Amino acid sequence: MSNTHSVKSLVVRLGFRRGRKRPVRGGKRIASRIVAFLAVALITGGATAAQAAASTGPSLILNGSNTDIAVQGPNDSLTFYWAKDGSPTWKPETVAGSGTTYSAPSMVLNGNTIDITAMGPGNSLDFYWATIGTGTWHSQTVAGSGTTYSAPSMILDGGNINIAAMGKGNSLGFYWATATAAGTRTWHPETVVGSGTAFSAPSMILNGNAINIAVQGPGNSLVCYATVPGSGYWDPATIAASGTTFSAPSMIVNGNGVDVTAQGAGNALNLYWSTNDSGFWTSGTVASSGTAFSAPAMILNGGGVDIAVQGSGNALDNYWVPDGTDPGHLEIVASSGSAFSAPAMVLNGSGVDMTAAGPNGSLYDYYWSQNPSTNWSAGMVAPPGSVG
């Protein structure tokens, strides 16, 4: 890419579109999917900065009429669960056995295959795929030992698969391969930015003809890097200054721009947005200090965004932030003692599906039982001892 391309032309920005109202969510989620309300022991003593021990967070996607979840399993294995809409039964598959997986996974739907990537043994980067419905998983090494030091982020970019992860010495690495090559893929590495620059797992999106990667930067800052595929040049932009960011970010395209959210100072929850080609980021506080205890997940939903996060006392909280406002409207998905990882979330028709690790290494699926109700229902995906 020519250096004449500016950050303005690469990083598409978001300005909240004012005057839109959140649509009324119509219709009832399938009743047989409503297994049970979550009932778990409460953590006493109120909210504290020191949360109970956390499990590795899951990854969640829609696959036609199925919902798919991937998560680090017991003994550093990798497990995949799927359920048909309307079914209370989650079916498990072992993607990779013990001693293979050392981070939260990232998962995408790629034509007729499911693709999963995660950090492997010796700080390697591994890739797995299965043809939908076969239950047979294949593996490939993307990058060898000593290359990967965070959970990865993965997207499809036309005919390519792209993976980003924190590299050695707090660098930021990027890998791409032809999406349709299956077992013959050749992975091409790029250094997004060198040592001392990346301090979290990244969040990556395809934004028009550009790839954007957000990551916690030096001094607890928040930074975005952008490239035109094939250029090999990454353009940096500072989203938020030092002392603002204390988790991995979540980033999405929203209309004519980008939203980024992350845990802020004092366990607050922050949101950043920027209009097209403005070169300026605006910040807002979604929730004040003492409310956010994990990396957040974010999706578009009507005239705003939903942001889910592990809340105080290991609750699971969702904030809806309407266009044109800063504070989020809190919906308690599950009460204290329920959530023990960062959540994952998708928009599923007229409702939202969310998943997170539960007590004692269990795994739960949360969803709106009836729209526009904000009452969340929950079903157990996997029993205690299933999540690493």
Image (cartoon, helix red, strand yellow):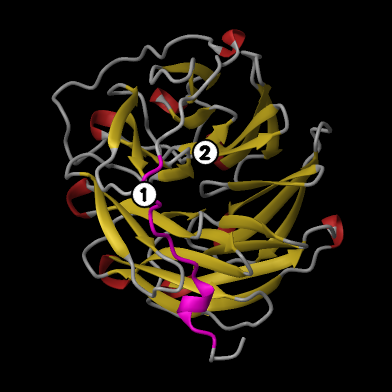
Amino acid type for the residue under numbered disc 1: Arg
* Residue 96 percent across, percent down from the top left: 68, 42
- The residue identified by callout 1 is 18
* Residue 78 drawn above or below residue 211: above
Residue 248 visible here = no
Q: Secondary structure at mark 1?
A: loop
Crowd class of label 2 (few under 14; some 14 to 19; many from 20; radius 10 Å): many
Q: Quadrant of the N terminus?
A: bottom right
140 vs 341, left or right, is right
Spatial separation of the CA atoms under disc 1 and disc 2? 33 Å
227 vs 38, left or right, is right
* Residue 32 drawn above or below residue 363: above
Label ID, residue 58? 2
Residue 242 visible here = yes
Q: Is residue 9 part of the magenta span, yes or no? A: yes
- Foreground mark, 1 or 2? 1
Give the residue furthest to the left.
Answer: 45
Q: Which residues are magenta?
A: 5-20
Q: Is residue 193 part of the magenta span, yes or no? A: no
* Residue 241 percent across, percent down from the top left: 25, 70
Q: Residue at x 38, y 21 (%)?
A: 374
Q: Which of the two discs, 1 and 2, labels the residue nearer the N terminus? A: 1
Q: Residue at x 24, y 29 (%)?
A: 313
Q: Secondary structure at mark 2?
A: loop
Main secondary-structure element of the magenta-colored stretch: loop
Amino acid type for the residue under numbered disc 2: Pro
Whether pointer 1 and pointer 2 mark residues with C-beta atoms closer than 8 Å, the reply is no
33 vs 273, left or right, is right
* Residue 384 percent across, percent down from the top left: 48, 21
Q: Which quarter of the figure has residue 200?
A: bottom left
Crowd class of label 1 (few under 14; some 14 to 19; many from 20; radius 10 Å): few
